[in-house]
Image (cartoon, helix red, strand yellow):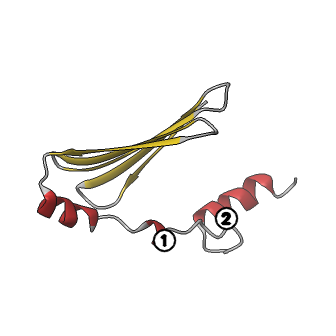
Amino acid sequence: VVASLRARCSAQAVEERRTVRDSQGRRETTVTRRRGDQAFITTTKEDGQSKDYQEEVVNMDDRELAQFAGTWPRQDELRAPNLSDPSSVLGSFFRRWFSSW
């Protein structure tokens, strides 16, 4: 099973998430954050018993990496959309298409 998501955070900043899960339950998730020719790539591999985490930095030194990290919201700032909120686009979509369920 493969799932991927691409989000534009600003005019130049793009985040891509890709998750692959095999029939044995192993999962590999790669998050690529790009701005221009710079990128920060994390890969997490899980097999149910262990977790391996790798980072790759492209075209940045430590100072640039700190600035680059400020381009995206922190994980604790991210929230799932409220599907019961009448102004939520996703909420409107789900209410429209699945209201008869």
Q: Residue 64 location, x and y as percent?
A: 14, 60
Residue at the outermost top position: 23
Q: Is residue 97 above or below residue 19?
A: below
Mark closest to the chain's N terminus, 1 or 2: 1
Q: Please name the residue shown 12% across and 63% down the image.
A: 63
Residue 91, numbered label: 2
- The reply to whether dot 1 and dot 2 touch (C-beta < 8 Å) is no
Looking at the rendered structure, the secondary structure element under dot 2 is: helix
Q: Which quadrant of the view contains residue 43?
A: top left
Please state which amino acid type lies under the numbered disc 2: Gly
Q: Please name the residue shown 61% across and 74% down the image.
A: 87
Q: Residue 17 location, x and y as percent?
A: 44, 45
Q: Please name the residue shown 71% across and 57% down the image.
A: 94
Residue 76, numbered label: 1
Q: In the shown orientation, is residue 7 left or right of residue 20? A: left
The answer to which of 12 and 27 lies nearer the viewer is 27
